[in-house]
Amino acid sequence: MTAFVSEIYAVTRRLLEVPGHLSPKSVADACSVVLHEVTRTEYGSEFEGKSEGGPFSVLSFRMLADSPERPRSMVVLDIWQEVEITEAELRSYFDLSTDNMSFNPRIPRAGAVFFSEQHANRTLVLQFALHSDLLQAIAVRENM
């Protein structure tokens, strides 16, 4: 699993270091995937991509259409169910302190623990299963 942990760390760092606002091209480049637009409405757009052979099953990128000068967006990287990466394996890469922790006992049905880190104008969120401590998803949100 160490290769997957290194890949997760590298992809999140690239997303956090994208200069300016996140865009479909910058997200695709940072994650080494091809994004396809799946939805476009007056409220925004959603793009999706699948990684080949890595820890991520699906990558989703959502952009709200509320302000071209200050776009709001979010990248969600879902982890393959077969990839079992624990909180302990990621502790040396991410700030998983209780100061940055929250939990929801109902999402998904078995519950989830969330750790967040602030990075300039972006927030990184790691989601773990409440009872197994397995990584389920990573999100990078662009702050207003």
Image (tube, rainbow, N blue to C red):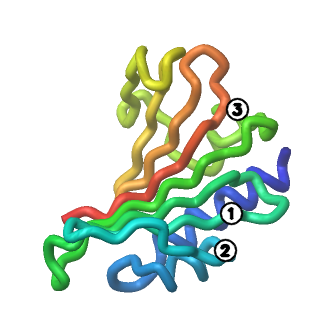
Q: Indicate the position of residue 98 as horizontal and vertical percent values.
A: 42, 28
Q: Nearer the viewer, residue 139 or 52?
A: 52
Q: Which residue is mark 3?
A: 86
Q: Which is nearer the eye, 2 or 40? A: 40
Question: Is residue 6 found left or right of 65 in the rendered image?
Answer: right
Relative to residue 46, is residue 138 depicted above or below? Answer: above
Q: On the picture, is 44 further left or further right than 48?
A: left
User: Could you tell me which secondary element the residue under label 2 belongs to?
Assistant: loop
Q: Amino acid at mark 3?
A: Thr
User: CA separation, marks 3 and 1?
Assistant: 22 Å
Type of the residue with mark 2 = Val
State the residue position of label 1: 50
Q: Residue at x 70, y 32 (%)?
A: 86
Q: Say which residue label 2 marks.
A: 33
> Is residue 75 left or right of 129 when viewed as pictured?
left
Determine contact: label 2, label 3, CB under 8 Å. no
